[in-house]
Structures are given as C-alpha cells and as structure tokens.
Image (tube, rainbow, N blue to C red):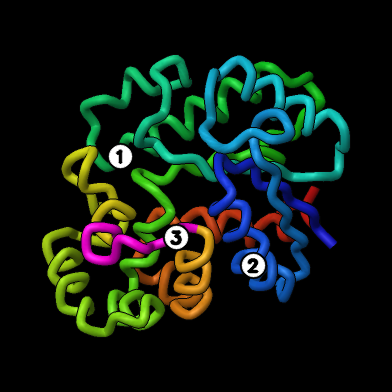
C-alpha cells in the first residue's frame, strides 16, 4: 500500500483528510493520513516558511517510502513563503506559482538521492469552505436551513467556480456562510457537509482540487515504474 502524509494547517483540514479523503483513496490502495503543521497543541496557521520547510524535510527524511503533500491556504500565507511575492498579481493562478516555488525549495533542500515525486504541495486559493459551495443545496440542508439554498446559489452564481469565491477579506467562503448561519462550526458542520456532497462532486466543480487528487491517485503508477 502506498502511504502519503498531508501536512495541513488546521483541524478542519485534518478531519477532512481523515474522514473524506482517506476513505476515498483507500479504495485505490493509497493510505493517506494528516499531520497538523507545527508543534503539538498548535491551533492552526502555517507560520514561518523556514520552520515549515524544516518540518517537511524532516518528515521526508524519516521514511524514504512515504510521499508527502500539503493542504494550505494561499489567502493569509506569509510573504516569506516561496513564490508568495512573485504571485501577488497573478490572481487565481497564484497558488500554482507558490506550489512550484515550494516544490523547488524542498527539492533543493533534500539530498541528490531524493525522488522529486515524493513531495508535491497543494495550495488552495482561499479556504476549505470553498469546496462546500460545490453543492449549495446540500450545504443548506446540512445546516438544516433549506431556505438558505437560494442565498448560497446566488453567491456561487457570481463566480467562475466554488474555488473563486472571495473578493474581500470579509467575504471568505466561511464568512459568507456565517453571515447567513451564525452558528456555523467549521469542523462539525463543514465536515458533515463535505461528506454529504462527496469527493466526486467537489472535484467536478473545483478544477484545482481535482488536479491535486489526480496527482495523488497517480502515485501508485509512479511507484510501479521506478
């Protein structure tokens, strides 16, 4: 079985990997687990790049058989992260610029015997809740507030895809949900909604998220051709 560790920035992403992604990938003989970045007790946020780089490289060096990826938000990422300054004016393509820069930094830090395919970063433009807008109706139903379906549909209709939802710091996907449903809890409601919506709907509506999953799913093929 192929093993892959996702380094995530918060408890919501950790639960998303554990309860949504891991069961899906397990069917493809890929065992995925999540590790929260930072020291035990860390409540979230990716922090300084040097510290994160050291943590990623240490993890890769501990076991030469594991693969490693990330699930971080571009929004709010410190400017000292690779590619962050260069990506400022590239709009929705900014996460990909950062991903390539991070991958290069990790590759340069590791030894010459390191196989580059063992690490690949994933940076989502805004936050986890963007994925929930893949199905506004199921999101509203999960909150037991069917009347919010129209409001959530209207939000989605203003953007090219769920991944594009945000045009101001106060309008991040989670803030939009809270505006209509103040009792929203990321880990509780968010994970239930994600499970009901399902991976296939999310990847159909969210192109960048789908690219990440495709990369993960090809790991077994990479191993067999080494």
Q: What is the x, y in percent for residue 97?
A: 39, 31
Q: Which residues are magenta?
A: 178-186
Q: Nearer the viewer, residue 193 or 200?
A: 193
Residue 112: horizontal and vertical position, in percent?
A: 77, 20
Q: Residue at x 33, y 54 (%)?
A: 174
Query: Mark 2 or mark 3, which is nearer the start of the sequence?
Result: 2
List the residue tagged with mark 2: 19
- The span from disc 1 to disc 3 (Cα, nearest Å) is 29 Å
Mark 1 highlights which residue? Answer: 93
- Magenta highlight on residue 98: no
Give how far across and how far down residue 127 sits, in percent: 39, 48
Residue occupied by mark 3: 185
Up the image or down, 34 lies above or below 141; here it is above
Is there any visible trace of residue 199 in the rendered image? no
Q: On the rendered image, what quadrant is the N terminus found in?
A: bottom right
Q: Secondary structure at mark 3?
A: loop
Question: In the image, what residue occupies the spot 20% across and 82% down?
Answer: 147
Mark 2 → mark 1, Cα distance in angstroms: 29 Å
- Which residue is drawn at the image coordinates 49% and 76% (left, top)? 198
Measured Cα–Cα span from mark 3 to mark 2? 16 Å
Q: Earlier in the sequence, mark 1 or mark 3?
A: 1
In the image: residue 147, left or right of residue 47: left
Q: Residue furthest front?
A: 183
SS label for mark 2: helix
- Please rate how many residues cluster around mark 1, counting C-alpha atoms within 10 Å: few if below 14, some from 14 to 19, many from 20: few
Disc on res. 201: none
Asked if residue 179 is among those painted magenta in the image, a careful observer would answer yes
Residue 103 appears in view: yes
């Amino acid at each position: 079985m192929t093993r892959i560790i996702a380094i995530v920035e918060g408890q919501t992403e950790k639960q998303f990997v554990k309860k949504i992604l891991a069961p899906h990938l397990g069917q493809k003989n890929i065992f995925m687990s999540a590790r929260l970045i930072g020291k035990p007790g860390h409540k979230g946020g990716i922090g300084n790049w040097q510290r994160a780089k050291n943590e990623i490289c240490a993890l890769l060096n501990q076991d030469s058989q594991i693969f490693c990826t990330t699930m971080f938000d571009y929004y709010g990422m410190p400017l000292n992260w690779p590619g962050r300054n260069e990506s400022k004016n590239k709009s929705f393509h900014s996460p990909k610029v950062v991903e390539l820069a991070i991958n290069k930094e990790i590759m340069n830090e590791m030894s010459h015997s390191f196989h580059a395919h063992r690490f690949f970063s994933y940076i989502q433009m805004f936050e986890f809740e963007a994925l929930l807008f893949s199905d506004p109706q199921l999101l509203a139903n999960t909150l037991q507030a069917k009347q919010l379906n129209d409001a959530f549909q209207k939000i989605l209709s203003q953007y090219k895809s769920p991944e594009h939802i945000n045009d101001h710091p106060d309008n991040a996907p989670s803030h939009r949900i809270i505006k209509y449903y103040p009792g929203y809890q990321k880990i509780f409601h968010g994970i239930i909604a994600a499970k009901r919506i399902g991976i296939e709907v999310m990847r159909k509506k969210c192109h960048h998220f789908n690219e990440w999953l495709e990369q993960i799913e090809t790991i077994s093929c990479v191993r067999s051709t080494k």
